[in-house]
Amino acid sequence: MAPRLQRQIKVFMLMMVSLCAGAQTSADSTLAVFEQWMARHGRIYMNNLEKAKRYEIFLKSFRFIENFNKEGNRSYRVGLNQFSDLTTEEFKARYTGFQAMSKSSKSSTATTFKYQNATEVQYVSPPESANWVDKGVVGDVKDQGDGCGSCWAFSAVGAVESLLAIKKSVFADLSEQQLVDCDKANKGCKGGRMERAFDYISRHGIAYEKDYPYKNGQGNCNETAASASVTKIDDYYSIPVNERWIERSVSQQPVSVAVDGDSDDFKYYKGGIFSGPCGKKLSHAVLIVGYGRSDSDGKNYWLIKNSWGQQWGEKGYMRLQRSTGTYGGICGIELSASHPYLN
Ligand SMILES: *[C@@H]1O[C@H](CO)[C@@H](O)[C@H](O)[C@H]1NC(C)=O
Ligand SMILES: *[C@@H]1O[C@H](CO)[C@@H](O)[C@H](O)[C@H]1NC(C)=O
Ligand SMILES: *[C@@H]1O[C@H](CO)[C@@H](O)[C@H](O)[C@H]1NC(C)=O
């Protein structure tokens, strides 16, 4: 604690020197970068001590990004974004929100049988690629905001929006807030799982976004808005841990998945094919909306839609390496895949 405070005071002093005296140090130019970044992202800090603290975190991010891109030997790039003044802990607490299940909760063999028997995707070899964004059935990338671990709701709603668009040829923007406020099997802004959200939607339906808009926080369930829920699904399926099965499913509709999204590499991803390093501690929910192979380097990828706004990654999307040959896939993307079902 003490050394940290000392360091912050040092940074603070340095800032005061450079702010007041205009000293030409190299810290000067990163401070300028920081202040440009603050302006770009509309950051205002309470006082100069808070600013010094945030500047210190920013510097760490800045150096990480600089070193990463200097090495230049990866299949993807990283860059500054709206998360650059947050510690890893703060980032995890505010921007993720997937709840991993205890190991004993589901038998994977039973899941496989249920899946094979119930879905139409069996025994069909998946196509080489799929892209639901190009087909116009994926809604705009949304932003879960800085106050709610609601990624699970965005992933589930995204999957339902696309399924309805595919089946009914009409796109409807649906409500994440209803899930955050009303789905008691999940924990609102404290996290949740997409299967439970699908279960809720199959029983209660889901309202339009405009009738139950997102508010970056959790409140009481608005029964009036929820009872206007027009859209239902029939059921949902958990997909076995298997790349081919997930490809087959994605070739029919977007699929909800969870990933380990806690690393700085993931947080600062800017473009290219993300290849880790990352673990398999599932923390963040996203939506697979396609897969394919990169023309430039021949790497296979999953196309995922995130809920961190359009500034993150490739306009809000990430291409994540596919066919890595490791159990569960990169960042554990194959470990908890599911999709809604509509007759
Ligand atoms: C990239 O280069 C750095 C330093 O030269 C090395 O430590 C790292 O392992 C390399 N990474 C890959 C993915 O090759
Ligand atoms: C799935 O189908 C197989 C073969 O028809 C059958 O043996 C099995 O009991 C079914 N499993 C479930 C969960 O329905
Ligand atoms: C509940 O939703 C209805 C319909 O969208 C809206 O008119 C009303 O203001 C909402 N109530 C609250 C407390 O937000």
Image (spheres, helix red, strand yellow):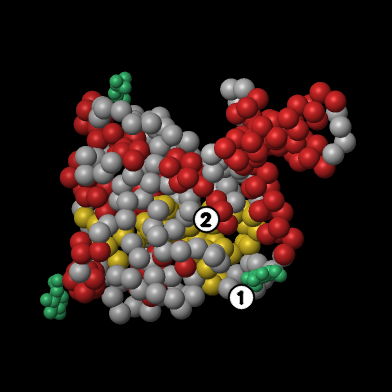
| Residue 30 coordinates in the image, percent (x, y) | 76, 41
SS for tag 1? loop
Q: Residue at x 44, y 76 (%)?
A: 326
Is 295 rendered above or below residue 266? below
The numbered mark at residue 251 is none
Asked if disc 2 and disc 1 are in contact, CB closer than 8 Å, the reply is no
Q: Quadrant of ligand 2?
A: bottom left
Q: Under 8 Å from ligand 1: the CB of mark 1? A: no
Q: Is residue 19 visible?
A: yes
Q: Is residue 40 visible?
A: no
**Residue at image mark 1:** 298
Q: Residue at x 31, y 47 (%)?
A: 192
Rendering coords of residue 155 (x, y %):
38, 50
- Residue beneath the point at 21% across and 31% down: 227
Question: Of 222 and 29, which appears nearest the observer?
Answer: 29
Q: Quick one: quadrant of the C terminus?
A: bottom left
Amino acid type, residue under disc 2 in the picture: Ser
- The residue pinned by badge 2 equals 263
Name the residue nearer the viewer: 176 or 66: 66
Establish if 201 lies above or below 217: below
Number of marks drawn: 2
Classed neighbour count for the residue bearing mark 1: other residues with Cα under 10 Å, few (<14), some (14–19), many (≥20): few
Going 30% across and 79% down the picture, which residue do you hit?
Answer: 123
Residue density around tag 2, few if under 14, some if 14–19, many if 20 or more, within 10 Å = some
Ligand 1 closer than 8 Å to label 2 CB: no
Residue type marked 1:
Gly
